[in-house]
Amino acid sequence: MNSERIRNFCIIAHIDHGKSTLADRLLEETKTLSKKKMKEQVLDSMELERERGITIKSHPIRMTYKHTDGNEYILNLIDTPGHVDFSYEVSRSLAACEGALLLVDAAQGVEAQTVSNTYLAIENDLTIIPIINKVDLPSAMIEDVKIQMMELIGCDENEIIEASAKSGIGITNIFDAIIKRIDAPLNKADHDCRALIFDSMYDNYKGAIPYVRVFDGVIKPGMTAQFFAHDREYEITETGHFVLDKVKTSELRSGDVGYIVASIRDMGHIEPGDTITVKSSMAKDPLPGYKKVKPMVFSGLYPADADDYDQLRQALEKLKLNDASLEFTPETSEALGFGFRCGFLGLLHMEIIQERLEREFNLDLVTTTPNVIYEVHTRDGKTLIVDTPAKMPSTGDIDSILEPIVSAEILTPKEYIGSIMTLCQKKRGVYKTTHYLSPEKAQLHYDLPLGEIIFDFYDKLKSISSGYASFDYEFKEFSKASLQKLDILIHSEPVDALSIICHSDDAYHRGVALCSKLKELIPRQMFEVAIQAALNNRIIARTTVRALKKNVTAKCYGGDITRKRKLWEKQKKGKKRMKMIGKVEVPQEALLAVLQVDND
């Protein structure tokens, strides 16, 4: 088809603003799906996505629309994940489009994720079509939301489309705007071939399949594909488009969105943002914007039953086939045995992987405290990357420790600003600016340490703002900080799964809080169990789990006190011997205590 009649666009919105529902209406209107096959959230195929109401994996789809001008147009919708953890995938999906539908809930207004994705769209020079969704709700604040949207993107009021994805209001206006306002892709079929990989999936029979947007040239089966990120070459055996299922085509031309099959067996060879070219018309330069996705949060995953170790390894390998951003390496813990150190993009990514392992592979898992990456500069001039407290060198060898800092953006009704600022200060946040999107809604900018916000920051933010505040962040830099490793010793043995890296000002309070929390969770033994918190091998806090005692003098009635003393001495010796050889089992709830320690 003539590239003049192609429109490539995406939908950007905050979680739960109706993105998947709008996609359903567009599919229904273009008759891509029959009424019989239609179901809610068609593009969210994963059970977890439907349950949580979020998009985890992006799904492109091609629609054919007959416009009132008599022409037939091809509309390529590239769906994007909505959560902050997947912001790099969102940026690659945006780079594959010429336009974006900016969807805002009429009852909730502009949220943090909306703002950050809008800025990403502006950076990629996309045409933005503002849409207010759910206008038929009784609680809709249409005029207020219009002011917020005009403030955000500087549009005119008459450019904003009022719609309801659920009841189908304004859908025709949306199609008109897509065709009239979004530019058609440039026809560069005669240029050297360049295609952007914006996503991928793994098929057991066809191997790893990259999802691509072709910018220059033509891609046909029989050509040899070459990637810019590595030197490997693959022969292309199939090309095609997405119409819910994959549909084979003879070629992909400049402006098209589709997939390529080339029997790629290693998922690691396909990276979002990389450029594919072909040997017969090889491009010299890749498309801009590619960067390697780096995990930001690390956690240990261990099978509750040691016999499940191989099963856990296979499950992680299978998940990695469809999620190249997941990283894992084997590790051993004295407390937990054999397991894996896994790297995630963020806490939601970690939660999703953990839930999928438990559901899809029927595994019972023990998870250690999430940690972030620290850069440690040693006195002998080396730089170490530390993703677990166990790898932290001894204090005498450390010259400085750098922690990751994120640039955070919080959107909140103005009455909660004071309590949110207090929360950010407690988390060692550095205040930047306040900006009012409307008389009632403010946007706060803070620099926050990532290590402080991965525990309970989001929950606390939601509770102090009655659920109205929204939060978004992106990595900014590594910055020097006064950090120390806090060790927990149970029965004089350090438990590596309970060690944490925390700020020096916080260490004492954290140590005391952890010890008292563990005292409640560790079951009583036949001998006394000491729980200690140590900084640099110096004990800073201690509690004791009292021993279970048998009343050995119960059978003594009357008689000389020496009889009782003799029995008590005998019991004391037995307890001492038991203490020397006794082992303390640490339950899973105790390992999770680190997450629940409130360091206010």
Image (cartoon, helix red, strand yellow):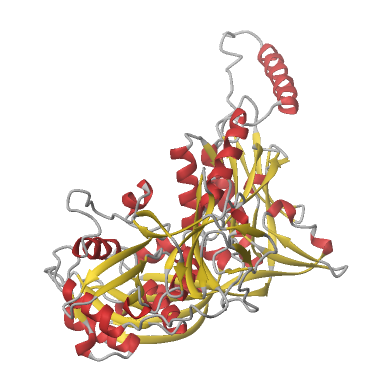
Left or right relative to 582: residue 356: left
Q: Nearer the viewer, residue 452 or 511?
A: 452
Q: Residue at x 55, y 73 (%)?
A: 194
Q: Residue at x 24, y 53 (%)?
A: 40
Q: Please determine whether, in this image, residue 558 is positioned above or below residue 175.
A: above
For the N terminus, the quadrant is: bottom left
Q: Please determine whether, in this image, residue 483 is positioned above or below residue 324.
A: below
Q: Nearer the viewer, residue 133 or 600?
A: 133
Q: Residue at x 69, y 54 (%)?
A: 389
In percent of width and height, residue 516 lies at: 55, 46
Q: Nearer the viewer, residue 27 or 250?
A: 250
Left or right relative to 172: residue 126: right
Outermost residue, right side: 380
Residue 598 shows up from this direction: no
Which of the 4 image quarters holds residue 117?
A: bottom left
Residue 360 shows up from this direction: yes
In percent of width and height, residue 251 lies at: 46, 64
Q: Nearer the viewer, residue 444 or 332?
A: 332
Which of the 4 image quarters holds residue 14?
A: bottom left
In percent of width and height, residue 500 lies at: 64, 54
In percent of width and height, residue 436 lies at: 34, 86
